[in-house]
Image: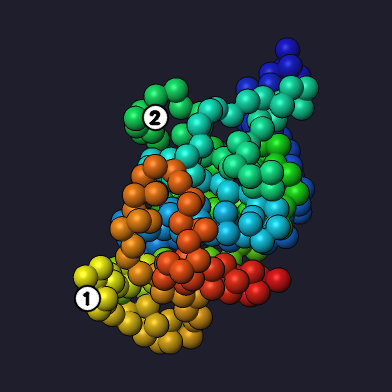
């Protein structure tokens, strides 16, 4: 009886053995990802998930194999940004779940794909969230990929700390706006990365200006140059500055990526440069 309980993980020794087996499986699974990038921000509402989703698509369109893992467990938005529907299915005998396909070379995993009601609130404490993030790696039938892009909730709490501990070779991309109230939290994110020994690939400044459709002048709604100043002070690379673009807002709400084909759009031009910068820096 004791042996059966241990096999099922019902004893302290059994639970420890299961955790060790899961950790070993995670380490083995992570060998299949050449680059692991954590998209994070100190403050919510800066466009972090949008950039994580679009960066994944941009890299995939360059012919790279990409996995996109949404660990924003309380506010998942990746499936809606991409217009993805459907739920995660079991892979059969392997007992692994199959991530959703967005492109032939891009796979997506989000807690929203496991919820029947998309408006259901996930009211979870730290230990449960840590367990779910680990399962997103060990229990998903990911393909070997050039990139694992991880969309993390804002702040420096359980989720980014878990990623730092479980995926120690992850590099961070920190998203901000030019506004000082956002930059103050970015400095905390930079400090977090230093404390957990996470390399920072660079900063992305979002919402850096709105081009007036009538006169063509740029309106600095959230100040200007905050991203480049912060990057220089911290000795980091500014991967790019993205303008506010009403078309992007509309397409994000509808799950459309049509903007990527509008080559003359300032947002498209700058985002293409960011994708190139990320690809070159993470080779």
Query: Where the C terminus falls, by quadrant?
Result: bottom right
**Mark closer to the observer (2, 1):** 1
Q: Position of residue 262 (x, y in %)?
A: 48, 61
Q: In the rendered image of this protein, does residue 240 appear above or below residue 117? A: below
Residue on which the image places disc 1: 215
Question: Counting residues from the N terminus, which is met first, the one under dot 2 or under dot 1?
Answer: 2
Query: Where the N terminus falls, by quadrant?
Result: top right
- Tag count in the figure? 2
Q: Residue furthest front?
A: 214
| Circles 2, 1 touching at the beta carbon (< 8 Å) | no
Q: In the rendered image of this protein, does residue 163 appear above or below residue 13? A: below
Q: Residue furthest top?
A: 1
> Which residue occupies 36% across, 85% down?
229
- Spatial CA distance of label 2 from label 1 is 41 Å
Residue on which the image places disc 2: 118
Quadrant in which residue 233 is drawn? bottom left
> Which residue occupies 39% across, 82% down?
228
* SS assignment at label 2: loop
Observer-nearest of 3 and 59 = 59
Residue 153's label in the rendered image is none
Residue count near mark 2 (Cα–Cα under 10 Å), binned few <14, some 14–19, many ≥20: few
Q: Position of residue 247 (x, y in %)?
A: 35, 56
> Which residue occupies 43% across, 67% down?
265
* SS assignment at label 1: loop
Q: Position of residue 71 (x, y in %)?
A: 49, 46
> Which residue occupies 58% across, 59% down?
58
């Amino acid at each position: 009886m004791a042996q059966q309980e241990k096999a099922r993980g019902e004893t302290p020794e059994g639970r420890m053995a299961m955790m060790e087996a899961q950790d070993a499986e995670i380490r083995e699974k992570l060998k299949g990802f050449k680059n692991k990038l954590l998209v994070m921000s100190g403050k919510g509402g800066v466009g972090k998930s949008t950039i994580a989703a679009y960066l994944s698509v941009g890299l995939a369109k360059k012919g790279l194999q990409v996995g996109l893992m949404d660990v924003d467990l309380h506010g998942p938005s990746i499936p809606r940004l991409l217009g993805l529907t459907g739920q995660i299915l079991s892979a059969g005998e392997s007992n692994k779940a199959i991530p959703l396909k967005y492109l032939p070379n891009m796979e997506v995993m989000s807690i929203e794909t496991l919820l029947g009601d998309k408006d259901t609130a996930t009211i979870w404490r730290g230990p449960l969230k840590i367990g779910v993030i680990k399962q997103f790696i060990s229990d998903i039938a990911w393909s070997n990929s050039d990139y694992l892009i991880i969309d993390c909730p804002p702040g420096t709490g359980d989720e980014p700390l878990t990623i730092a501990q479980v995926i120690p070779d992850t590099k961070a991309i920190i998203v901000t706006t030019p506004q000082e109230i956002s930059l103050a939290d970015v400095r905390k994110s930079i400090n977090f990365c230093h404390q957990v020994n996470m390399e920072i690939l660079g900063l992305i400044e979002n919402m850096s200006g709105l081009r007036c459709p009538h006169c063509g002048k740029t309106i600095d709604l959230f100040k200007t140059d905050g991203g480049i100043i912060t990057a220089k002070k911290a000795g980091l690379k500014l991967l790019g500055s993205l303008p506010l673009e009403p078309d992007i807002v509309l397409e994000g709400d509808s799950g459309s990526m049509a903007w990527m084909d509008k080559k003359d759009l300032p947002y498209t031009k700058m985002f293409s440069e960011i994708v190139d910068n990320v690809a070159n820096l993470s080779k």
